[in-house]
Image: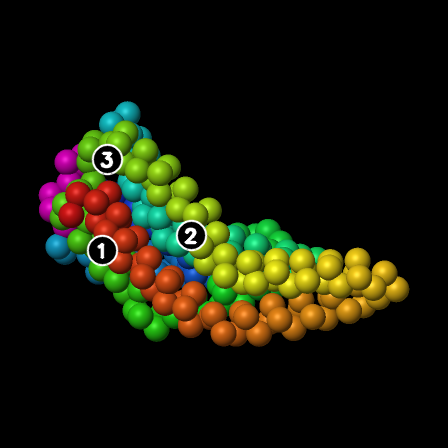
Amino acid sequence: MLEWVARFFWPFLRIGAFFVAMPIFNSRSVPLRVRLILALAVTLAVMPSLPPVAESDLLNLAAVLVAVRELVIGIAMGFVLQLAFAALVFAGQNIAYSMGLGFAAMIDPQLGVQVPLVSQLYLLFATLFFLGLDGHLVMIDMLAAGFQTLPPGLEGLAREDLWTLVRWSSGVFSGGVLLSLPIVIALLFVNMALGIATRAAPQLNIFSVGFPITLLLGLALIWLTLPAILQRFADTLPATYELILKLLRA
């Protein structure tokens, strides 16, 4: 009986932590009950193919260590994918501040903080793009396959794996800068031109003229560069999957 409970409990911890940290599913718009049902369904689906558990006693110190390791593995998988979406949020913030939309912000249902509307737009399209590519199914498939290469037990993520996650997180800033750089540079030249015009004609009201110009130009550039940004986001997904497989020893 204890072995059967352990075969259910250890995978459920990893899968539940994964759904808590994974984008889309960790959104506040997704009720906790839905995430719990999804975690239970995936756990019951992968249970028949699981290898024998190394620790079947749930009432000792070793069981606590196994539980912590399973939670860390699930959260790490979701965190890696979360960084791919965070790069879009960072890019949207850079663009919004450059075009004068930094004051127009709303609550992000995933992060729970205020982000500019441009970031919300990028997140919306990226989420639809990710679901259209069956990215959620790929993640669940890797999650199920990870129990074969990294079964529940005392062996978890190594110290080098944690440093890999830290180095991967730096890609949020570099990726966000690269995504927003074309629009930010274009708006910078526009602001320089408006500054020169103001010096040439001091009677020109720069706020009444410059703000509509930068806003309309920024919206036009967002529309023109949106396919390229989504393509760049799609190009980062294989590297994200590869890192997750590396963490799972696959």
Answer whether residue 118 is visible to the viewer in this image.
yes
Three-letter code for the amino acid on which mark 3 is drawn: Gly
Residue 104, above or below 177: below
Which of disc 1 and disc 2 is earlier in sequence? 1
Q: Between label 3 and label 2, give the one nearer the viewer.
A: 2
Residue topped by disc 2 = 175
Residue 149 position in % (x across, y down): 14, 45
Residue topped by disc 1 = 142
Q: Which label number is shown at residue 229?
A: none
Q: Residue at x 33, y 57 (%)?
A: 236
Tally of numbered discs: 3
Distance between the Cα atoms at labels 2 and 1? 24 Å
Write the start and end of the magenta stretch as one range: 50-59
Residue 154, above or below 24: above
Residue topped by disc 3 = 156
Residue 81, above or below 204: above
Residue 137 position in % (x across, y down): 28, 65
Q: Nearer the viewer, residue 69 or 77?
A: 77
Q: Is residue 147 left or right of residue 179?
A: left
Distance between the Cα atoms at labels 3 and 2? 29 Å
Circles 3 and 2 in contact, beta carbons < 8 Å: no
